[in-house]
Amino acid sequence: MKIRGTLTLALLAVILIAADLVQRFVIAPSTRVFPSRRHAILAGWQQLMALAVLVPVRFVGGAQIGDIPQIPGGSGILILMNHQSLLDIPLVVRATRPGYPRIVTRERYASGKPLISHMVRLYQYPTVNPRATGRVDLSRLAQAAASSPVPLVVYPEGTRTKDGGIGRFRRAGLRAILPARDWEVWVVTADGFWECARLEDFRANVSSIRGAVRVDGPFQGPGQDASSEAVDAFIGRVEAEMRGSLEVLRTTELAPEAGP
């Protein structure tokens, strides 16, 4: 129903505009005034923002979102998630609690986007330009990954697929990140959200969402001394794991109910 979708988008717009002001004038200053509480402040705020999106989507939009499994927070955690919809970020944030993740983000989101651009800077999200990622950019990404005190999230497909299937992994970023440290790798797979890939899709289809999230792992990363062959083999393994998890979601949890 487009009416429910329109109401949900309007409510989210109001929430995000208000949240942008709170983030700039309350949250960010608080992290400077209370540096010892920075992690707790940022964790609480990011979790609140994820709920501020998902709660209206559920109760105003009518979406059905199942329980979201949890991944332990902390350093040395790498989360790989498939990319289906506008809800991917709040979903992975709710999976990463207590605490919060840093999300590898497209460079264009670092400026000009209310709330989001300031959040990219405040949370020190690593940024990439998928169309022009050179050696210097990959080195910077590896350094950010190696030093992150919180989990790092990567959407290895780089873009959303039209049917919600798993697209081919873009490997350059993972080849830089995986040898940066000894990782504990978790695979997050979501399905049922792909018809809300764009704002117009969201407005039309939010009430028909029947979504589910699956978490697999942990898998031990290839390690800092791994060869390029071992890194590629590991990427292939987790890509196959994600494809298999999507198939499980589609054939069990999200399979159409049998008729009478």
Image: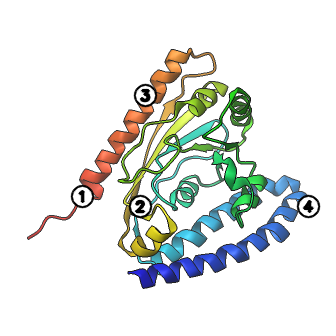
What is the number of the mark on residue 33? 4
**Which residue matches tag 1?**
255
Q: Position of residue 49 (x, y in %)?
A: 64, 67
Q: Residue furthest left?
A: 260
What amino acid does circle 1 point to? Ala
Which of disc 4 and disc 3 is earlier in sequence?
A: 4
What amino acid does circle 4 point to? Val
What amino acid does circle 2 point to? Phe
**Which residue matches tag 3?**
236
**Which residue matches tag 2?**
193
Which marked residue is nearer to the observer: mark 4 or mark 1?
A: 1
Which of disc 3 and disc 1 is earlier in sequence?
A: 3
Residue 233's quadrant in the figure? top left
Q: Residue at x 52, y 61 (%)?
A: 86
What amino acid does circle 3 point to? Gly
Q: Residue at x 42, y 72 (%)?
A: 206
Which of disc 3 and disc 2 is earlier in sequence?
A: 2
Q: Position of residue 51 (x, y in %)?
A: 58, 69
Q: Are marks 2 and 1 in contact (CB under 8 Å)?
A: no
**Element at badge 2?**
loop
Q: CA distance from mark 2 to mark 1?
A: 14 Å
Position above or below: 148 against 235: below
**Element at badge 4?**
helix
Judge by depth and name the residue closer to the eye, 68 or 210.
Answer: 210
Which of disc 1 and disc 2 is earlier in sequence?
A: 2
Judge by depth and name the residue closer to the eye, 80 or 151.
Answer: 80
Q: Residue furthest front?
A: 131
